[in-house]
Structure formats: C-alpha cells, structure tokens
Image (tube, rainbow, N blue to C red):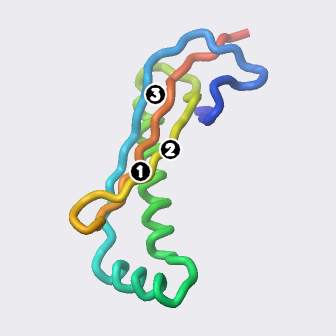
Amino acid sequence: MLKTTTSSVDGQEIEHYLDVVVGEAILGANIFKDIFGAIRDVVGGRSGAYEQEMGKARQIAFDEMEQKASSLGADGIVGIDIDYEVVGQQGGMMMVSVSGTAVRFKRS
C-alpha cells in the first residue's frame, strides 16, 4: 500500500477519500534500558535501546493504520502525520501515533 506524508501522489488521481485512519502504539522501556539511557545521557551519545524501542512502536503504529485502511478497500494513505509522546508516570512509556487519509486511486 502506498503511504505518503503529502496530500497527493504524482501520476495518481484520487477517486475516493475513504476515511481518516489511525495507528497507535505505546511501549514501556524496562528498568535496564532506563538505567543505560540515563548513563548515556550523562556521558553523551545516542541511546540505541531507546531508538530501537521507538522504531518498534512506529512500525506497530504504521501496521495498524495500514490494516485499517486495507479493511476500507484503500489503495493508499495520504497526508500521514507522525506524533511521538512520552506518557505514564515519570515518562516511563513512549507513544507513537500515526494518522492519515485512506484513499482509493482512479483506475485507468
């Protein structure tokens, strides 16, 4: 399925705007990742554990959004927006939310 952050697709004419579709994922980081992330913050550098968790959450959210669009008979999702939030007590969980408009393209 074609997915884009733009509102149109070169070479494709949108025939039907089906509905807004959303995918969300909330993942917690375990205590060891928190400790190593804190150490990394003090000494500098990137936190690979957090980057990996964010990647997992993003993929889950995109998969969920795509499944919802597919169930509507969509060919693509346009206007995708990606949001990241820290939630939970003391920011212990990460949330990724993606949304876009499911569309059907005109057949030639």
Q: Which residue is mark 3?
A: 69
Viewer-side residue, 84 vs 14: 84
Q: Which mark is residue 82?
A: 2
* Mark 1 closeness class: few <14, some 14–19, many ≥20 residues within 10 Å: many
Work out which quarter of the rendered image holds the N terminus and state it.
top right
User: Mark 1 is on which residue type?
Assistant: Val
Whether tag 1 and tag 2 are in contact, CB under 8 A, the answer is yes
Residue 63 relative to residue 93: left or right? right
User: Mark 3 is on which residue type?
Assistant: Ala
**Residue at 74% across / 9% down in the picture?**
108
Q: CA distance from mark 3 to mark 1?
A: 18 Å
User: Mark 2 is on which residue type?
Assistant: Ile
**Residue at 41% across / 25% down in the picture?**
71
Q: Position of residue 48 (x, y in %)?
A: 51, 76
| Numbered disc 3: secondary structure | helix
Q: Quadrant of residue 36?
A: bottom left
Residue 31 relative to residue 2: left or right? left
Q: Is residue 7 above or below residue 80?
A: above
Q: Which residue is mark 1?
A: 96
Q: Position of residue 10 (x, y in %)?
A: 76, 24
